[in-house]
Image (cartoon, rainbow, N blue to C red):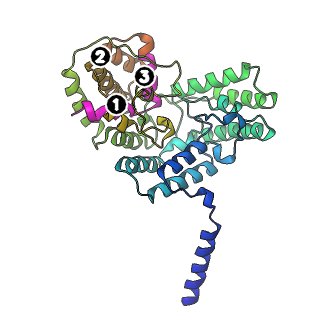
Amino acid sequence: MYKTFFVSLLLCLNLVGCTDKSDSFSSFDEARSALKSLNTVLILGQESNNKKITEENIVYSNEYLDKRHAIYQQLMTMKLTPNQITQVNYLVIAERFPERFFPWPAQVDVLHNMSLFNRSASTVEQTISWLKFTQAKLGIAKQSNLKLNKLEYSLLQEYVAQAIVNKATQGAIKSHIRAFSNYLDNYKPRGSVGLRGLSNGSEWYQSKLNYYGNAVNSPLEWVVIINKQIKALESAVINVKFKQNHTKSFAVQYLSEEPLINGLDWQTHYLDLPAMASNTKLSNNDKLLMLTMMETDIGIHYHAWTIDQAKVNLSKRLKVSEQTAQYLVEDIILYPGQSFSFCGQICY
């Protein structure tokens, strides 16, 4: 028995000794930097044109998932603030949901981003590998009835079409892009655009509501709370400023002039949106805007509203233009739950 114990102890010591110290982080900020480096093809850094893409940068590859999980696990051992702990718990919970089956997040033109990296043979090889990996993952996902929604599908088709006609696209890659385009031509997206249309989608959506809303309420409970607040506000014409793409969510853009609070999630551009929103002063018009976004969010992701139904609700509540309604609905589809970051100020 003692011999077995000492052999096990020696093995553990060897494992510790072999651990790459460069992958150890002593602070929240160091771990955050590691996540930013890992997600570099999703959100470009200033150094991207001089950087090579590694296996770990292939989004949702086994190497990527292992690296990200290791960073999360280290964060869980650190002494963090309550807000930081909440962020880490949210991201750890998200690991169990089906996001990993969709290696091309539709809000980001990953193919274009990869073309901006160091143009070496290895970068070309990694881009081709990523396209094949994405197609294979989408095929595996379909076997589990996990499919892109219509908006995600349309955006991917748009990115691919742009890459094919772009003269700067390298010839070695273009044939593989065409092959992926042919695959998409025969792909049938799911009917529902909301998360509830996915396996475990309702649970995934609930985790987002819990995090961004900072409260454990069911979607139906949220509807009661939101409608009560909306009734206290008058309908108004809302002027909304936004970029023409969805690389940054509307919530991130809205809070861009507020004091920044660091976060861990690439989908929030590494900002702590609930903490930032809690410090923001909202006019009555802005309160109505955010409440209507929340109401529409639940409509899409829980009640399975169509895009047209969601646009009608936004136009009715806010009297916004067709273009603005379309943009906001797309934002809600691509960034579920983020509007609930403002709940701390306006829901109670």
Q: CA distance from mark 1 to mark 2?
A: 15 Å
Q: Of the two numbered discs 1 and 3 on the same chain, state the one appearing first in sequence.
A: 1
Type of residue at label 3? Val
Asked if the residue at tag 3 contacts the one at tag 1, i.e. Cβ–Cβ closer than 8 Å, the answer is no
Residue 153 shown in magenta: no
Q: Of the two numbered discs 2 and 3 on the same chain, state the one appearing first in sequence.
A: 2
Residue carrying label 2: 317
Nearer-the-camera pick, 3 or 268: 268
The vertical placement of 27 against 2, above or below, is above
The magenta segment is: 325-348
Point out residue 28 in the picture as x, y percentages from the top left corner.
47, 50
Residue carrying label 1: 298
Residue 167 appears in which quarter of the rendering?
top right
Under tag 2, what secondary structure? helix
Residue 185 appears in which quarter of the rendering?
top right
**Residue 329: mark in rendering:** 3
Q: Residue at x 50, y 19 (%)?
A: 243
- The reply to whether residue 223 is visible in this rendering is no
The vertical placement of 56 against 10, above or below, is above
